[in-house]
Image: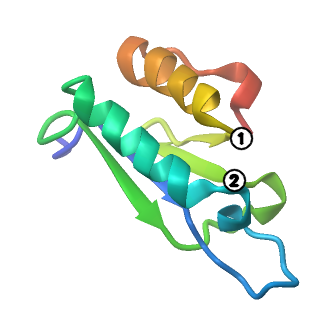
Amino acid sequence: MSFFDKHVFICCNQRDACQDCCNNHGSSELLGYMKDKVKALGLAGEGKIRVNKAGCLGRCDDGPVMVVYPEETWYTFLDKEDIDEIVNEHMLNGRVVERLKI
C-alpha cells in the first residue's frame, strides 16, 4: 500500500530567460495555491494527498504541467480555477478532468 492515496507533482522548473518553462506560467504560485487548498479541505497527510514541487517533468510544450500518481494522469493548468477543478473533480471525486488532461 502506498503511503499517500494520491501524489501530485507540479513542475516549477525555471529555465534561462529565453527558454519557455512551467515557472514562466506561474506554476510556483499555483503550487502554493493547490497545497493550501488540499490542506484546507483536510485532504493532506498520510494516507491522503501529497502535493510536491518538481523540477523539469519534460513536457515544457504543454506547460505548466502536473502529474497525479498512482493514476499517472497528466494535466496542464492555467489558473486557480483550473486547480480548483482538478482538486474538486480528481482529488475529491476520482474523476479525471478531461479538458485539462494531456
Q: Identify the residue at horizontal 42%, vertical 50% (top origin).
A: 32
Residue 38 position (above or below residue 54): above
Point out the residue furthest to the bottom here: 16
**The N terminus sits in image quarter:** top left
User: For the residue marked with disc 1, what is the amino acid?
Assistant: Leu
> Colour scheme in the image?
rainbow
Tell me if mark 1 has few (under 14), some (14-19) or many (20+) residues whose alpha carbon lies within 10 angstroms of its own. Answer: some
Residue nearest the observer in this picture, 97 or 69: 97
Left or right side of 42 for 102? right
Q: Are marks 1 and 2 in contact (CB under 8 Å)?
A: yes
User: For the residue marked with disc 2, what is the amino acid?
Assistant: Pro
Left or right side of 50 for 1? left
Q: Earlier in the sequence, mark 1 or mark 2?
A: 2
Report the disc number at residue 6.
none
Q: What secondary structure is marked by label 1?
A: loop
Q: Identify the residue at horizontal 57%, vertical 49% (top origin).
A: 66
Left or right side of 24 for 95? left
Q: Quadrant of residue 25?
A: bottom right
User: Percent from the top left, x then y, of residue 2?
Assistant: 20, 44
Q: Is residue 16 visible?
A: yes
Q: Which residue is mark 1?
A: 78
**The C terminus sits in image quarter:** top right
Report the disc number at residue 64.
2
Q: CA distance from mark 1 to mark 2?
A: 7 Å
User: Percent from the top left, x then y, of residue 80?
Assistant: 58, 33
The nearer-to-camera label among 1 and 2 is 1
Q: Identify the residue at horizontal 52%, vertical 15% (top origin).
A: 95
Residue 12 position (above or below residue 71): below
